[in-house]
Image (cartoon, rainbow, N blue to C red):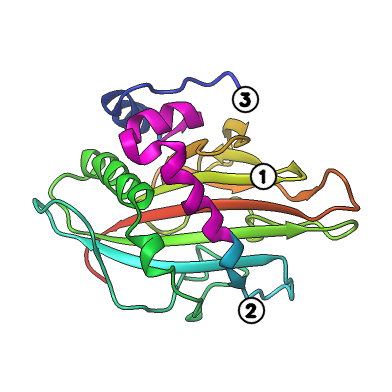
């Protein structure tokens, strides 16, 4: 995948994110950290839910290449677990999303069974362990995003059409669910001076990037079909933690 280190334990993952602002986990290592929730029998129906996403109609560039669903959760300091919140719009300030920021964007909700599934709950727990290490004793507002980026012959898809960016949160977890007939999709991590810190491609199911959003920026290069005669898509889960309540 690439030559950057890959933490093998939760403690190592926490230390790497705290030390350099990001980490990359191959899928097999993430699955091991998730325990039974990372087993194929649990992940397969979760990944299949990407077939039921709805078109993102808020793309200011006019693109129809993105499908998504969203959900939100809260976590109280000292209280285990995450509680799903009422459905609400996704909002980003223009400073964080120059293309689509500044407006409430209403997307279809993550299906209840998907949000309560073992992989999602295990990923929420894992991400919170890293977030708590960065900022102990905080309440957290968490957003869950299911993304599908579609591409066709002469019509690339843009995983991050806003470019390399901060999300305006504390921690971002990006997990690959599927790449279908796809080329491109390279992840770039850089500092605020646009100095490149890492470059890698999430290729396999559960390959994951964990990013301290206050310290580093991230972006993903455009994608296209390997075989232009066949459908092409990139399915990704994004979870974000922001200190405080909504």
The residue wearing badge 1 is 179
Residue 174 vs 73, above or below: the answer is above
What residue is rendered at 55% in x and 41% in y?
Answer: 193
Residue 182: horizontal and vertical position, in percent? Answer: 76, 44
Residue 77 falls in image quadrant: bottom left
Residue 135: horizontal and vertical position, in percent? Answer: 21, 45
Q: Secondary structure at mark 2?
A: loop
- 1 and 3 marks in contact (CB < 8 Å): no
Density class for disc 1 (Cα within 10 Å; few <14, some 14-19, many ≥20) is: some
What residue is rendered at 27% in x and 72% in y?
Answer: 85
Residue 188 falls in image quadrant: top right
What residue is rendered at 91% in x and 53% in y?
Answer: 229
The answer to whether residue 137 is left or right of residue 13 is left
The residue wearing badge 3 is 1
Farthest left residue in view: 78
Quarter of the rendering occupied by the C terminus = bottom left
Closer to the N terminus: mark 2 or mark 1?
Answer: 2
The residue wearing badge 2 is 57
Q: Is residue 148 magenta?
A: no
Q: Main secondary structure of the magenta part?
A: helix
Say how many tags the image has: 3
Q: Secondary structure at mark 1?
A: strand
- 2 and 1 marks in contact (CB < 8 Å): no
Instruction: Measure how far apart labels 1 and 3 are at the Cα level.
Output: 14 Å
């Amino acid at each position: 995948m690439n030559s950057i280190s890959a933490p093998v334990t939760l403690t190592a993952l926490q230390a790497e994110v705290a030390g350099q602002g990001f980490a990359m986990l191959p899928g097999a290592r993430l699955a091991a950290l998730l325990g039974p929730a990372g087993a194929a029998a649990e992940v397969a129906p979760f990944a299949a839910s990407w077939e039921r996403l709805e078109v993102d109609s808020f793309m200011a560039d006019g693109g129809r290449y993105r499908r998504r669903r969203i959900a939100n959760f809260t976590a109280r300091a000292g209280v285990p677990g995450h509680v799903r919140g009422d459905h609400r719009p996704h909002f980003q300030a223009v400073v964080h999303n120059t293309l689509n920021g500044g407006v409430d964007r209403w997307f279809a909700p993550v299906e209840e069974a998907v949000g309560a599934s073992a992989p999602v709950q295990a990923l929420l727990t894992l991400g919170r362990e890293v977030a708590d290490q960065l900022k102990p004793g905080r309440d957290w507002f968490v957003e869950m995003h299911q993304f599908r980026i579609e591409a066709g012959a002469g019509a690339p898809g843009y995983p991050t059409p806003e470019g390399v960016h901060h999300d305006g949160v504390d921690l971002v977890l990006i997990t690959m669910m599927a790449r279908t007939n796809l080329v491109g999709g390279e992840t770039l991590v850089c500092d605020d001076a646009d100095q490149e810190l890492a470059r890698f491609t999430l290729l396999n199911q559960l390959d994951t990037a964990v990013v301290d959003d206050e310290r580093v920026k991230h972006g993903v290069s455009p994608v296209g079909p390997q075989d232009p005669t066949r459908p092409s898509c990139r399915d990704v889960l994004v979870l974000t933690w922001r200190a405080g309540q909504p």
